[in-house]
Image (spheres, helix red, strand yellow):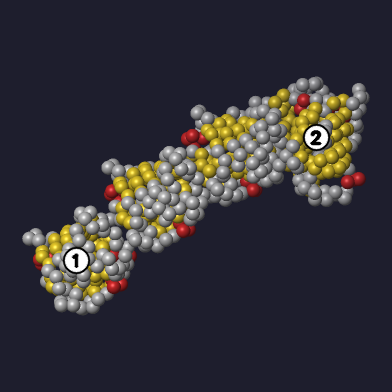
Amino acid sequence: MPAINVTRLAENPHVSVNGIREDTSSRGKDLAGSIIIATFADGSSETLIWEAFDPYTNGGVIGTDVRMSNGFYLHDLTTTKLLTSVQIDLAPSSSVFDSTVFEDIDPDGPSTPGSKYGFPFVVADAYADLAGDIDVTYSGIVNLAGRPADGDLYTTMRLDFTGLAAGGLLGTLQWNSDIDTMRDAGDLIPTQTEQPGDLIDFNAFGVYGFQIGRQDFGDFEVSTDGLTLEQDSQSWDQLLGDFTVDADTRLQFDFLSDVAGEIHGIMFTNGANLSQSTTLQFLGSQTYGIQAHNDYVVGSGVQSYDIRVGDYFTGNFDRIVFLTDDDRNVGATSVWSNVSLDGAAPLSQPDLEAFDFAAFGVSGFQTGRQDYGDYTISSDGMSLEQDSQSWEQLLGDFTVDANTRLQFDFSTDVAGEIHGIMFTNGAKLAQSTTLQFLGSQKYGIQAHNDYTVGSGVQSYDIRLGDFFTGDFDRIVFLTDDDANAGAKSTWTNVKLDGATPLPQPELDTIDFSSFSLSGFQPGRQDIGDASVSANGLTLQQESQSWEQLLGNFTVGTNTRLQFDFSTDIAGEIHGIMFTNGENLSQSTTIQFLGSQRYGIQSHNDYVVGSGVQSYDIRVGEHFTGDFDRIVFLTDDDAYVGATSTWSNVQFDVDFF
């Protein structure tokens, strides 16, 4: 015998003024007008109207793949196609299911006066070998006028056969279920339910794709008044906010579809996580989630739902997802309108200021390895425009927690391999904390890799905590274009919770005239001339000049070096070396220009004749330690007349 799981829902209430007729033994002919909805495993369905087969006893329905009948006792069902559910709505026949076994004279039992003895759905003994479960859901609760509902009478019964061994019912089934008929025809009146709360304004909440690229591929459209969400094939769209479901929480909405996919439903969840146990399904060929309301018939027009969600689950959720799953691309659609949910509150909009790129300061990331391209900042500091192979970083304190929001506008007309934003520490690539938005090469998190080249400005609002959390000392805007296709990126109005620019260090400017300036390895390295400006702020070197400043120099993790550099003629090496004694130290030399590679190449990007270029270098990213000299070098073994001009050289005050 299959297990029978009974659920009674206190929704879609009806009232009877004159009650049940004295003869409570309803026959098949009494059910004329009842609506039968049979749903099959292939997603198709039949809606049939019950007819009286004779004037005295029998009635039923005859469809293409299903037929039902009843006389006085057993109900007979035959299906020639795998049947997943059948719903029987008795309200049009002024009849009800009497679903409890209590007598109406039992003071301790929930039984409506006049209903006498009832009983719920039970399978006939001949089907004792049927394996699995049958879920029975009663809805359309009925009460007598002037008396609250006793909880035994319901207009509608839905049988869910997906728990059977075959995943549905094929062949025949007999069952019994007590049915009473009202004394007067038409005496089952839908009662006015409590008015819904405020309708959800989809525009106010903001609609975002859920698991973009994994679940969400389709398009959606929100009506101008914000009250309707229309989804196309394979569209999973979420509203972020605070959603508390308790025992009394009501969800009300109107639903419409002309083409069925695998799943049409609403999911309550936290983070970017699928949650079958908190998904309500209303239509579809694939069974997923709670099935008590999986009764929509394609093409039947708008159907209104009023669901007591707390009958199925309770809890706190940070999003609800409207889903039109259509893996087979049959063109499924869903229209959700007039959605009301008790206590739903949109995610509070963070009070964010857009980044001023000029205030943060933009510098190349892994210059010479990743960053070769140019960039420009708009005059108001709100936009960063990158050219091909530009990786630009903002240094600061960036904390990402579960609720951190990143908002920005993005556009491009030419795609490279990767367009994205990376959160990292130090000069390290971090694929797991990179968000990609476009590109021929997949890199990092793909949930928002949905930009279409040439589509203009697209706005993003991303809950970073769905993907990662942590503390970072930089974010990197990257336009990777190894193929030199001319890729570009424009990032505008970038906002991030809790972003703090790297504090501008308290710097001392080197007065070259106050140091004991001398040649480094005279006669071996230092052969050229050098001069210091009258104000001591500029050092000018001629061909093959290696000049050192002696002192106590400490490089810590956050030590900054800033200066201006220019030259019109390039030698083999133009750079700055940190060392102890008269020792060459390639690992602590930073090169900016030259035909010979020597030392750290991250900033080897100066173009001869381009005039003064300003550098701001976090030296501690490359090395740390204590040194007794720094050497400014213009190496020119070929004697081409190389020069270097170093001006406004500044270090942290604790550097000396």
Between marks 2 and 1, how big is the CA–CA gap?
Answer: 104 Å
Whole-percent x and y of residue 560? 26, 62
Quick one: label 2 or label 1, which is nearer the N terminus?
2
* Left or right: residue 582 compared with residue 272: left
Going by the numbered disc 1, the residue's amino acid type is Val
Mark 2 secondary-structure assignment: strand
Which numbered tag is attached to residue 355?
none
Whole-percent x and y of residue 343? 54, 38
Q: Which image quadrant for residue 99? A: top right
> What's the residue at 82%, 33% (across, down)?
64
The foreground one among 132 and 342 is 132
Q: Residues within 10 Å of mark 2 (few under 14, many from 20)?
A: many
Whole-percent x and y of residue 364? 33, 56
Q: Nearer the viewer, mark 2 or mark 1?
A: 1
* Left or right: residue 380 compared with residue 60: left
Against 298, is 505 above or below?
below
Against 263, is 420 above or below?
below
Whole-percent x and y of residue 62? 85, 31
Q: Residues within 10 Å of mark 1 (few under 14, many from 20)?
A: few
Q: Quadrant of the C terminus?
A: bottom left
Which numbered tag is attached to residue 640?
1
Q: Which residue is mark 2?
A: 98
